Amino acid sequence: MKIAFLCIASGIMLLSVSVFPKKIGSLPDAAKPLFMEVNNGQLVISDQAPKVLLYSISPFKFQKELSRRGDGPSECNAVPQLVIGKNYIYLYELGRCIYFNRDGTYKNQFRIPQPHNILLAPLGDNFLWIKRPPEDGMEMSIYSQSQNKEFQYKKLIYLYRFDKNKSFGGKIEYPIVKDYCGTVLHDDRVFIGDSKRGLYVEGFDSNGNQFCKIRLYIEKSKISEEYKEDWMKRAKQDKLWSYFSNIYTVVFPEYYPSFYRFDEDNGKIYFLTYNKKNANRELLITDFKGKLLKRTWVPWVENEMYTNFSIENGKFYYIIDNEESEVWELHAVDIQ
C-alpha cells in the first residue's frame, strides 16, 4: 500500500514511530466493546451486550456498570452511543438520552424528538443537534433551551450529504469502504471531521462560532486486490451472506478515504489514516491552524469494532482481543 504524500507548502514534518505498547488492564466484564472513550482519566465502554462499563485509568480499576439490557431508567435495549461531558456521561439510544454523574451514579434522562434525529448533546449552555432529514444528509445545528424546556434553533454549523446508493440489475450497490463524517465533543467545543474534503476538520464553540478550520490533502491509498479477496472470502462464510447478496451488489471504491477517524487532544487534531506499515497505522497530527506537526505510526488491530481507539494526554489508547485468554484488554502507547 502506498504511503501518503502530504501536500503542504511549508513547515517541518517529523517522522517517527510510536513504540513500546503497554497493557493497561484486562476487561473481563466486556463481551464485545463497540465504542470506547478515554476522558479525564476514565475509560467508558459501550458493549454489544448491550451494557456500558466505567473504569479508572490510573490505577486501572473497574468502577461501575452504568447500564445493561432492560427497561429501567438507566437501562438500554440497543447499543448506546457515548458522549462524555465535563460533568456527565451521556448515553444515546432509541430516541432518548440517559446521563450519569462522572462517578457513575444515575442522574436523569430526556427524550430526543423524533423522527430523523441522531444526536442531541449538551454543548456548554446550548445543545448540538444532529438531524438526518429525508434528503440523505446530516444537519448539525446549535440550539438553546428555554426555561420551559423547549428547544430553539440558533445556527446551522455544518451540512453533510451522503452519497446515494445506485441500483444495478435489480440490486442496490453497497460500497464496502465509505467516507466518514463525525464529531468529537470536548471542553464545550465540537469538532466536525469530513473525509470527503481531505484531512478536514472544523471546530466550533458552544455558540456555533468557528474557531478553527483544517484542510490538508493527501494522496489516497488504493484498495488492494488482496483486501477485496479477503473481504469477500470472510463475507461468504457469514450465514446471512445469501440473504445479503440477493439484495445488494458489493462495490469496492478504487481508493480508501482520506482518513478513518479523528480525535482532538490538547489543541491538536489526530487523523488516523488507512495507510499501513507492518502492524501499524499512520497517525497525522496538526495544530488548529492546519499546520502538520508530525507523522507517526500507532498499533492497529483489525477487528469488527466500530470505534476502538481514543487519545488523551499524548497517549493512544486501544482495545484488543487476547485470543489466548479470551479476554479483551486495554493497551496504550505514547505518541512519539
Image (spheres, rainbow, N blue to C red):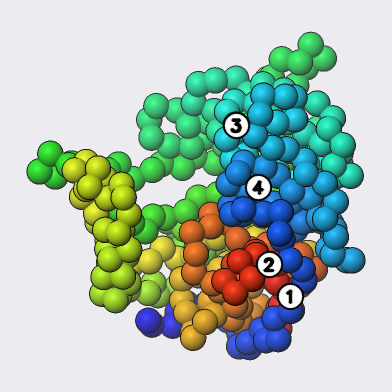
Q: Residue at x 60, y 20 (%)?
A: 113
User: Which mark is first along the chain, 3 or 4?
Assistant: 4
Labelled disc at residue 329: 2
The first of marks 2 and 3 along the sequence is: 3
Position of 42 with respect to 260 (left or right) is: right
Under mark 3, the amino acid is: Asn
Q: In this orientation, does residue 11 appear?
A: no
Instruction: State the residue at coordinates (50%, 64%).
Output: 303
Q: Give amino acid for label 1.
A: Lys
Question: Residue at label 3?
Answer: 77
Which residue does the numbered mark 1 point to in the structure image? 23
- Disc 3 element: loop
SS at mark 4? strand
Residue farthest front in this picture: 325
Tell us which disc is closer to us: 2 or 4: 2
Q: CB of mark 2 within 8 Å of CB of mark 1? A: yes
Q: Residue furthest left?
A: 169
Of 153 and 315, nearer the camera is: 315
Which dot marks residue 46?
A: 4
- Number of other residues with Cα within 10 Å of mark 1, as a class: few under 14, some 14 to 19, many 20 or more: some
Quarter of the image that includes the N terminus: bottom left
Q: Which mark is residue 139?
A: none
| Type of the residue with mark 2 | Glu
